[in-house]
Image (spheres, rainbow, N blue to C red):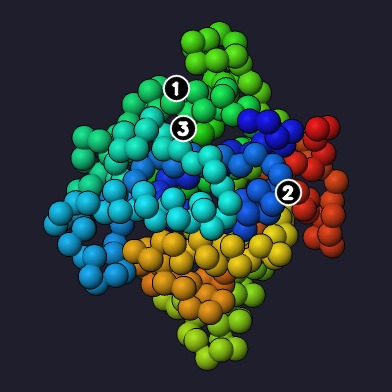
Amino acid sequence: MTSSRRVLFVHAHPDDETIGNGATMARYVAEGAGVTLLTCTLGEEGEILVPDLAQLAADQADQLGGYRIGELRDAMAALGVTDSRFLGGAGRYRDSGMMGTRANEHPRAFWNADLDEATAHAVAVIREVRPQVLATYDENGGYGHPDHIQAHRVAMRAVDAAADPGYRPDLGAAWEIAKVYWNAMPRSVVQAGIDAMAALGEASVFDGLGDLDDVSFVVPDDVVTTAVDARAHADRKDAAMRSHPTQITVDGPFFALSNNLGLEVMATEHYRLVRGERGPAAGPDGWEDDLFAGLDL
């Protein structure tokens, strides 16, 4: 990697990267930063939104994972990302499905992965790419999906292991990541999305889920540290989302996942800094506006 600024995103399945970080990725590519995506599974257990491809499902031909490799490739082309990898190679770890399902028991399910082995695969990428910044999920994986939780565990373990000169020197020279972020969805942003949907005559997607404060992936605004404004690249995020048709249906400024959860497509993406020094505030909320803020590069 020849860029002076390098960032690594760690995700569980193809499409997670575009939903959570697509605009950020496009912005940094446009600015000349090195952007690497590390995806942990092929998303074999995903529900399929395209009827003509229903036969690819895990309980039929079980070919969805291979198809989603192509979707991910197209999404990365839309974002301009040229360094996209699978943890341990494509197909090393399988989508574990939702918590409590039979897919959790599959022998290759990422949920059952040997953490030492998976960590070593991630360390190899970190020591090769040498990113100053890493972004992944929080300890609950955002909403409790086993693969998201496991991706969090592997990423955080790898951050520590990669910086230890005594850990697996065969994987390359030790490298310490300066800043680690977890993806965050501020309460105020989600509320704004709900209000926008209501203005269009759409019912709240959170009906029946109780108080918004109880929704697992929503976090209080005061834990958010960073808002990356990538509105200039919203078209790239939109195109990347359309590259994942088996999982995402795009409808104007909103998108629907296979569980019918609609969220406003936000080109400003939010993060929570959990390792490293916070950079200077750049807006009225007191948040950073750059994942590299405060770093001397």
Q: Which residue is mark 2?
A: 31
Look at the picture and state if 109 lies above or below 254. Answer: above
Q: Secondary structure at mark 3?
A: helix
Which one is earlier in the sequence, the residue at label 2 or at label 3? 2
Residue 280, percent across and down? 85, 46
Q: Nearer the viewer, residue 4 or 146?
A: 4
Q: Quadrant of the C terminus?
A: top right
Q: Secondary structure at mark 1?
A: helix
What residue occupies the far bottom of the structure in this picture?
Answer: 201
Name the mark nearer the viewer: 3 or 1.
Answer: 1
Q: Is residue 140 left or right of residue 234?
A: left
Q: Quadrant of residue 106?
A: top left
Using a 10 Å C-alpha cutoff, classify the residue at mark 3 as few (fewer than 14 neighbours), some (14 to 19) or many (20 or more): many
Q: Which residue is mark 1?
A: 120
Residue 230, percent across and down? 69, 60
Q: Is residue 12 left or right of residue 268?
A: left
Q: Quadrant of residue 184?
A: bottom right
Look at the picture and state if 74 lies above or below 131. Answer: below
Q: Which residue is mark 3?
A: 154
